[in-house]
Image (cartoon, grey):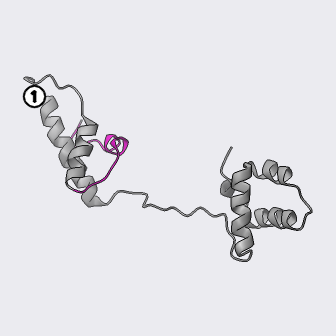
Amino acid sequence: MDQVHKRLTTEQVKVLLKGYCQGLLDRSAIEEVLGIGRSRLFALLKEYRYNPDRFSITYQRRSRPRLPSRVEAEIEKELMLDKNLIDDTTLPITDYNYAAIRDRLAKRGVTVSSPTIKSLPPKSLP
């Protein structure tokens, strides 16, 4: 099921929460309409009761959606080093070692996950 902010507007959720606070709606009905569990409902209620006028369910991204260009350049550099090892026929290396790349980047203060590195192949690859 989609997230609440994608299915309903803030005003629709406010009406449901207001109805619950006034005793007009029961908890299970609201959970069913919103498609959420008890814990999430009470988290929303807490937020709503704190400031009903400023309550919002809009999604606020906490991190930037894209890596800084400096970090991408560092990843690219490390991937190219591994590519050189893979291309060397005298070595039995056939694939990238993303965990090792992640560790080398961490030593230089660049914190990224292995899947992030894997999603950024070197630009010079065919």
Helix or strand or loop: what does disc 1 sit on?
loop
Q: Which quarter of the rendered picture does the N terminus lie within?
A: top right
Query: Dot 1, how many residues are within 10 Å of its Cα: few (below 14), some (14-19), or many (20+)?
Result: few
Where residue 49 appears, as percent x and y from the top left, is: 75, 71
Q: Is residue 66 left or right of residue 72?
A: right
Where residue 75 appears, as percent x and y from the top left, is: 24, 49
Q: Residue at x 19, y 45 (%)?
A: 78
**Part of the protein shown in magenta:** 109-125
- Name the residue at the left extreme: 90
Residue 119, picture quadrant: top left
Q: Nearer the viewer, residue 99 or 23?
A: 23
Where residue 95 appears, as percent x and y from the top left, is: 24, 29
Dominant secondary structure of the residues highlighted in magenta in the image: loop
Q: Is residue 11 left or right of residue 60?
A: right
The residue singled out by tag 1 in the image is 88
Q: Residue at x 79, y 63 (%)?
A: 12
Residue 6, picture quadrant: bottom right
User: Residue flagged by tag 1: what amino acid is it?
Assistant: Asp
Q: Nearer the viewer, residue 116 or 28?
A: 28
